[in-house]
Image: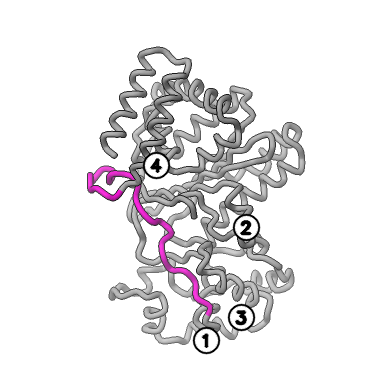
Amino acid sequence: MRKSGAAYLPLHSGKAPPWLFNKMVKLGRSIITLIIDDYGEDEFLRRVSDPYWFQALGCTLGFDWHSSGVTTVLTGVLEKILSEEDLGVYLVGGKGSKARGIPSKLMNNYADKIGYSKAEDLVKASKLSAKIDTVLLQDGYELYHHSILFSRQGKWAVVQQGMNPEVRYARRYHLVDDNVYRGYQYIEEPHEGIAGDRREEVVLDLTAESSRENKDTVLDIVREKSFRRDYEKVLKMDRNTLYRWIDKTSETSIEKTEILAMPRRINWSVMRKIYDIQPNSIPEFISIPGVTPKVVRAVSLVAELIYGAPASWKDPIKYTFTVGGKDAVPFPVDKDTYDKIIRFFKEIVEGSEIDAKDKKASLKRLARLGRKI
């Protein structure tokens, strides 16, 4: 993972008022047009996939930069701008039904424009990205927002967000095609960055390089008939064994860490379907209908407890790039990276075709961001 980070993203209800949204579109149209004209479509996608840059763009356009709403509002702003301007970059998706409608929208609205095979590849990238942050990375955050940005050449970037209702925070995931379509079977270290609320105690991360042996074993297990026997062995294990296995030192009961517990029920018809298909790769395995986080977690547990193939249980978030959000608690910041991004946006704003009042307001927001860092 080349970049990872944590940002306080408290969940906020409601939506941006129309006056703010329209102002963000007005400012954003000039800025984004200039970026694509000067740096190109691929570079714009790479920048959107950088969580630092994404946050800074929201700040530049005037949104509350530490809120979870920056994801939904900023992608909405980008969608409107890119649908109204022929810039060679497009965005589909959003919350709920808009995310579920991505495959049909890509095939019906964009296949003629970018080519049928490219549209099919984008559908695959969208589905695989959602699966990666649902079944391979199990961190307690359920996806509720998923957007894919793409160019005429078929290059893409995914921005998706999950929420944890119990702690009332969100986590945003950035993936870009150069990362997903490289390395081990497309699903090893795929994130350009993860912006979230905090480091979680225990996370099942099958995207980690250190989980490679576990992934290999998982693939072997689902293609054999012995899984049910091994699964029942794990269910009979002493709870202390499971505590030691997840390396959890607190006395919290395993029921309170549901995301990490061995599922007590498995859909055996799904397991039979997996066996009949005999998947040749992890992407093929997790793409089978019915392969849920519980199914993947159960097989991964068996791979570690029965066959000794360890999985990663560390949160992939490495450091924070905010100054603590609403509680104002300071955390270490990658100052050099943020300084570069602030300088970039200052140059872009100064060269954009927006009136002096809006230009001055944007530069003031960037200056405040620089002082915080």
Asked if residue 324 lies in the magenta stretch, the reply is yes
Give the CA separation, mark 2 to mark 4: 27 Å
Residue in front for this viewpoint, 49 or 130: 49
Which residue does the image show at 33% across and 42% down from the upper left? 335
Which residue does the image show at 60% across and 22% down from the upper left? 85
Check the image and tell me how it is coloured: one colour
Q: Nearer the viewer, mark 2 or mark 4?
A: 4
Asked if residue 257 lies in the magenta stretch, the reply is no
Give the CA separation, mark 4 to mark 3: 47 Å
User: Could you classify mark 1 by the number of other residues whose Cα lies within 10 Å: few (under 14), some (14-19), or many (20 or more)?
Assistant: few
Say which residue label 1 marks.
233
Which amino acid does the dot numbered 3 rest on? Phe
Q: Quadrant of the rendered structure where residue 43 is?
A: top right
In the rendered structure, find residue 337 and report the number of the disc placed on it: 4
Q: Are marks 2 and 4 in contact (CB under 8 Å)?
A: no
- Callout 2: SS: helix
Which amino acid does the dot numbered 2 rest on? Tyr
In the rendered structure, find residue 186 and report the number of the disc placed on it: 2
Which amino acid does the dot numbered 1 rest on? Lys
